[in-house]
Image: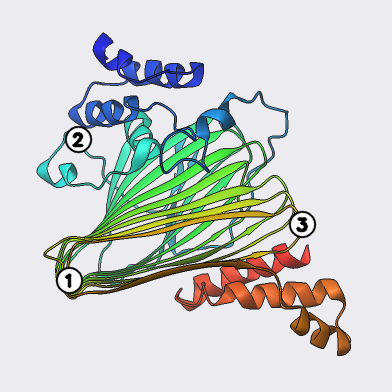
Amino acid sequence: MSSSLSASAPLLDARSSGLLARLEAMDPSPSRLRAREAFARTGLPHRRIEGWRWSDVRAALSRPPAGGATDAPATPLAGGSGLAFGEGGLTAGELAVSSWTRGVSENEARVPDVGALGWLAEALALDGADITLAPGAQPLALVFSGREGDRFVHLRIRVPQGVEAQVAESHLSGGGFSSVRVDYVLEAGASLHRSVFLAGGAECVQAAVASVRLAPGARFHQTFLSLGAGLSRLETALTHEGDGSEAVLDGAYLLGEGRRTDVVTRVDHLGVGASTRQLVRGAVKSGGRGAFQGRFHVARHAQKTDARMQHHALLLEEGAEVNAKPELEIYADDVQCAHGATTGALDEAALFYMRQRGLPLAQARALLTLSFIASALESAPSGPREALLGEAERWLTGA
């Protein structure tokens, strides 16, 4: 890396400097150069950067480990074929994948801005995999796990024209720092459902970053469940490149003491007649912290856009915290767009009704909370939906 590039990152902390040194030692391919230049503009994100006020990665990584790293949690999501990535890269796989040459093609150059951690994952991934989902293929399961140490993975997944497919991602960290980026490209008329499960220990920092590009008539559905981590961030950058494409971006989070999650969505509507639906629900106990940041952008020529964003959260106990920042940026005049956000508590009347019929208080609270978040998981296919609901129920009941 040139000295001018190293100097371009303002006020670098020791951890950022160490990461930049690792970047400098990697092969200087055009792709890595582009990614490390993007990362070097800010270094590790911190709260003074817009969009990172609730995901202060620099502060989280500057704290000395307390020796609390644990084994990676198990995943409730399963698939017919899959790849598993640990701290040393790909550890197991039932799928034939091809590596890519790390150049910057015209196709790659159009990838949306994936943020500092997305660029970091591209720059430091040991190797890459290019996956094309064939017609009739079984659901693909991707598992990213580790106990401690740094983990960086970058994948590209293409869904050809007219193909319908499913992908399940599990991001599981006992400790350490993990940044995973997956670039999804859906061709005309393609359909993909992405299910995501995130869970980590109180010592870990993990980010699951996705870029999604939709050609005309493509359909993308995303459903996630996050149980948080020391710091967990689910970031999705989606672009409606063609006319008539559809996106559904739903999910839920459940957070207890010492667990944080930040759900970040950026959607660019560039085609005519595209639609986006987003419903995120969360429930937080004392000592947990949830955040939602959503931005829908509608370009001037993107007429007939239909975009609706909702975030609703429950504060289950005193000391819980939820922050929300929904945004609409609209330049077209023939659109239907709306957003909303609410924060509240469980319905005391409903709790009283259930207690009167013999349910213990803890069970009544768990059932009401599960009912509240279930609507945000309904858009998933039956297998992932039941798996995520089962994991939520175990979390709520302590089973």
Cα–Cα span, label 2 and label 1? 43 Å
Q: Is residue 87 visible?
A: no
Q: Give, as a three-letter code, the residue at label 1.
A: Asp
| Quarter of image, res 344 | bottom right
Position of 212 compared to 370: left or right?
left
Position of 82 compared to 77: left or right?
left
Residue 309 position, x and y percent, is: 40, 68
Q: Which residue is mark 3?
A: 318
Q: Crowding near pointer 1: few (<14 within 10 Å), some, many (20+)? A: some
First in sequence: mark 3 or mark 2? 2
| Quarter of image, res 160 | bottom left
First in sequence: mark 1 or mark 3? 3
Position of 322 compared to 134: left or right?
right
Element under disc 2: loop
Q: Which residue is mark 1?
A: 333
Q: Which residue is mark 2?
A: 101
Cα–Cα span, label 3 and label 2? 52 Å
First in sequence: mark 2 or mark 1? 2
Residue at far bottom of view: 357
Taking the spot 22% from the left edge, 32% from the top edge, the residue there is: 31
Quadrant for the N terminus in the image:
top left
Camera-near label (3 vs 2) is 3
Residue 312 position, x and y percent, is: 55, 68
